Image (cartoon, rainbow, N blue to C red):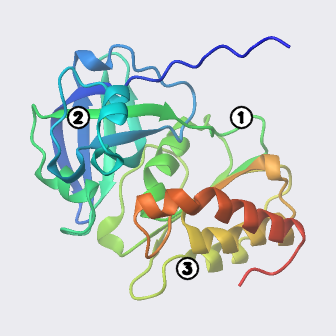
Amino acid sequence: MAERPERKPRKPHTAQVIRTERLTPHMQRVVLGGEGLADFSPDACTDHYVKLLFPAGGATYPEPFDIQRIREEFPREQWPVTRTYTVRAWDAEHRELTLDFVIHGDEGLAGPWALRVRPGETVRFMGPGGAYAPDPEADWHLLAGDESALPAIARSLEALPEGARAHAFVEISGPEEEQKIDSDVEVVWLHRGDRPIGEALIEAIRALEFPEGRVHAFVHGEAHFVKQLRHLLRVERGVAREELSISGYWRLGHNEDGWQASKREWNARIEAEQEGTSTPS
């Protein structure tokens, strides 16, 4: 048997902050550009994401920046910390990459950074990754998520062909978080208020009268409500696995490091439970 070719490690992209914009009280936009994006080449996926690299604990890394060298020479606790964000827009003509950040004051790592970063500062990231784009052959589309999924949902709606049938639900904290999306599809904005996250989404999708035909669905956000919606769609509604892009972008009570460490096991266990038609707790 032929040996597999050795995979070369991917190099991070280096970009500069071009501008920032406060979209809503809890959403900050950061636009990146510069010569370092010359080889950035996303494809047709509308859920593309990049992994931003933040110095760990104020560590200083040698130049030129070399992620492999850092991982070989620095202790693990000093490796760059990664945070994953969906690509809201990519302007190939001007080589500008737009990222939207959910912010909660000083909570977290990337949100506070997005608030304080200024034009000209350097940003490094890996990617892009991604796997979903609306299937133009589907009879209709279902898109649902919380604030963390809003960039991907918005980009997907903007990519739908004219006249495509779609139902889109986005749960946000309140009316001040609604955004303008360049799409003919009417987004149902669900205002959470003091309710548990995802509760309004589950109610809305359960109450939806599903149109006839094949649905292509995109459901992402906090892991616990995604678990409930996976059961609703796969078991109760009979949506085929291949017609469903569904995953927890984050999990309440966990930072990204903790969630990513357990995400694969969590998803595999939930899928096994629901393929056996057990009711999720």
Asked whether the residues under the numbered discs 2 and 1 touch, taking CB atoms below 8 Å apart as contact, a structural biologist would say no
- Mark 3 touches mark 1? (CB < 8 Å): no
Residue 16 vs residue 67, the one in the foreground: 67
Q: Which numbered circle lies on residue 136?
A: 1
Name the residue: 83% across, 49% down: 214
Q: CA distance from mark 2 to mark 1?
A: 35 Å
Badge 1 element: loop
Left or right: 263 as drawn, with respect to 110: right
Report the amino acid beneath label 2: Val
Residue 200, given in percent of the width and then of the height, sits at 55, 79
In the picture, measured across the screen, residue 85 lies left or right of residue 107, that is: right
Discs 3/1, front:
3
Q: Nearer the observer, disc 2 or disc 1?
A: 2
The location of residue 67, given as percent across then percent down, is 34, 30
Could you classify mark 1 by the number of other residues whose Cα lies within 10 Å: few (under 14), some (14-19), or many (20 or more)?
few
The 10 Å Cα crowd at callout 2, few under 14, some 14 to 19, many 20 or more, is some
Q: Which residue is mark 3?
A: 200
Is residue 237 in sight in this rendering? Answer: no
> What element does badge 3 sit on?
helix
Of the pair 127 and 269, the residue shown nearer to us: 269
